[in-house]
Image: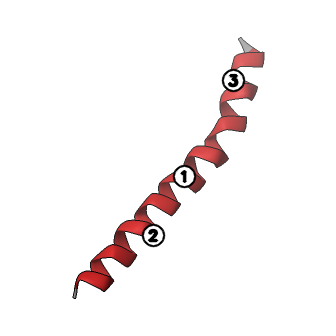
């Protein structure tokens, strides 16, 4: 169980980076659409 928790914590940064990138791309698209 402890191992799975460690693996999950390792995945969090990647997912967070992906989400921030997605939000950035959406923001850029909105700015371009203006």
State the residue at coordinates (48%, 54%).
19
State the residue at coordinates (51%, 62%).
21
State the residue at coordinates (39%, 77%).
28
Q: Is residue 3 above or below residue 15?
A: above
Q: Earlier in the sequence, mark 2 or mark 3?
A: 3
Q: Is residue 3 above or below residue 10?
A: above
Q: Which mark is residue 4?
A: none
Residue 30: x %, y % from top left: 28, 77
Question: What residue is pinned by disc 3?
Answer: 5
Q: Earlier in the sequence, mark 1 or mark 3?
A: 3
Q: Nearer the viewer, mark 1 or mark 3?
A: 1
Dot 1 falls on a residue whose secondary structure is helix
Residue 2: x %, y % from top left: 75, 17
Give the farthest residue toward the left. 34
Residue 14: x %, y % from top left: 64, 46
Give the CA separation, mark 2 to mark 3. 29 Å
Dot 3 falls on a residue whose secondary structure is helix
Give the CA separation, mark 1 to mark 3. 20 Å
Residue 17: x %, y % from top left: 59, 55
Residue 1 location, quadrant: top right
Question: What residue is pinned by disc 2?
Answer: 24
Q: Which mark is residue 18?
A: 1
- Label 2, residues with CA under 10 Å away: few <14, some 14-19, many ≥20: few
Q: Is residue 4 above or below residue 26?
A: above
The residue closer to the viewer here, 34 or 19, is 34
């Amino acid at each position: 169980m402890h191992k799975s928790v460690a693996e999950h914590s390792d995945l969090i940064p990647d997912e967070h980076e992906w989400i921030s990138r997605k939000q950035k791309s959406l923001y850029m698209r909105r700015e371009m659409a203006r």
